Amino acid sequence: MNKKWILSILAIITLLALSACGGNNDDSASKDKDSTGIKKEESKELNLYTGRHYDTDQQLYDRFTKKTGIKVNVIAAKDDELIARLEREGKASEADVFVTADAGRLARAKDKGLLQSFKSKTLEQNVPDKYRDDDGAWYGLTKRARVIAYDKERVKPEDIKEYDVLATDKFKGKVLIRSSDNIYNQSLVASFIALNGKDEAKKWAEGIVANMARAPKGGDRDQAVAVAAGEGDVAVMNSYYFGQMLNSEEEEEKKAAEKLAIVFPNQDTTGTHVNISGAGIAAGSKNKENAIKFIEFLSEPEQQEQFSATNFEYPVNKDAKTSDLLKSWGDFKEQDIDLTQLGENNEEAIKIMNEVGWK
């Protein structure tokens, strides 16, 4: 074989080798990612930062692991502490999913760049528009109504049909409510700003401060216990706390709740204020596909019904059934507002509460 033929054969072999290498790289890339660009090969774990602290939630996580083989590492702390931790950890954070209560907090996390947007047909089907972020940064998991609890012997339900009545002279020295630091109250005022404007929201907050039975202290259940003890006649609280008290293993809480009943305010006008607990994917998540699967799983009817049966929250998924206790409270009309407004109005709500001296 002459030199010319040898060089030609070597050139052909080289071209074939390069072609083969290029083909393998393309195949590898397509195998590593799906149509949305998410890497397919992820660890069989995900890290959950959650402000929810209910034993029944762990049962859902265990069910998810059994179904998917994905282990859920739970990092539980107070909601605002987790937001601060995500900020502090930055890009080094190991968080995949962030779960917290209140749309105001979820909006705050989004604004700080702690969450990433994502789309999911399953979540769009399971979670109605009003309970999820427009950009897909967070999705609601459960609903809580902010109701008025009252002493059944001292108050008639027809006398507390509206939030506004709590700010009138009729309830001077009789209202129990948490502090202005509490996000649930901030979101309640934020909802009034959305519905009625700043001036009316401020007028209501002034009336509440004037009618407080004592300086704000404790949580929602503490307000209800204080009503049962006669420190006031009415308390503003989230509905699921009332359900927890009725089913509490602590006799004091259970007895207190049995002396009370709840009203869903504003049924003839703007509806009862409803907030959510919800989930988003952390900005630096290294297990995004697992995170999406997890949030989708929690939105399914079976899991939604467990939220309702064990923690007495309302499902966001319309296909899920509510528990017998929630059914006994009856249907009610909700405020018709986009929950993203709770985050948008949060700063103004805090400003108003400070101006009127709400401690």
Image (tube, grey):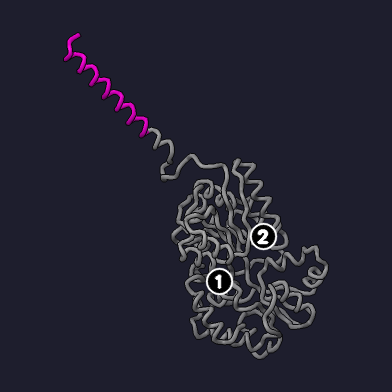
- Residue count near mark 2 (Cα–Cα under 10 Å), binned few <14, some 14–19, many ≥20: few
Left or right: 225 in relation to 201: right
Answer whether residue 305 is visible to the viewer in this image.
yes
Magenta-drawn stretch contains 14 = yes
Residue indicated by mark 2? 53
Q: Main secondary structure of the magenta part?
A: helix
* Pair 1/2: label in front: 2
Residue indicated by mark 1? 335
At horizontal 45% and vertical 52% (from top left) the residue drawn is 119
Q: For the view shown, which residue lies furthest in the top direction?
A: 1
Q: Position of residue 300 (x, y in %)?
A: 59, 50
- Residue count near mark 1 (Cα–Cα under 10 Å), binned few <14, some 14–19, many ≥20: many
Q: Position of residue 8 (x, y in %)?
A: 20, 18
Left or right: 190 in relation to 330: left
At horizontal 27% and vertical 23% (from top left) the residue drawn is 14
First along the sequence among labels 1 and 2? 2
Height in image: 134 above or below 40? below
**CA gap, disc 1 to disc 2?**
27 Å
Q: Which residues are magenta?
A: 1-26
Q: Which kind of residue does numbered mark 2 sit on?
A: His
Q: Which kind of residue does numbered mark 1 sit on?
A: Gln
Magenta-drawn stretch contains 357 = no
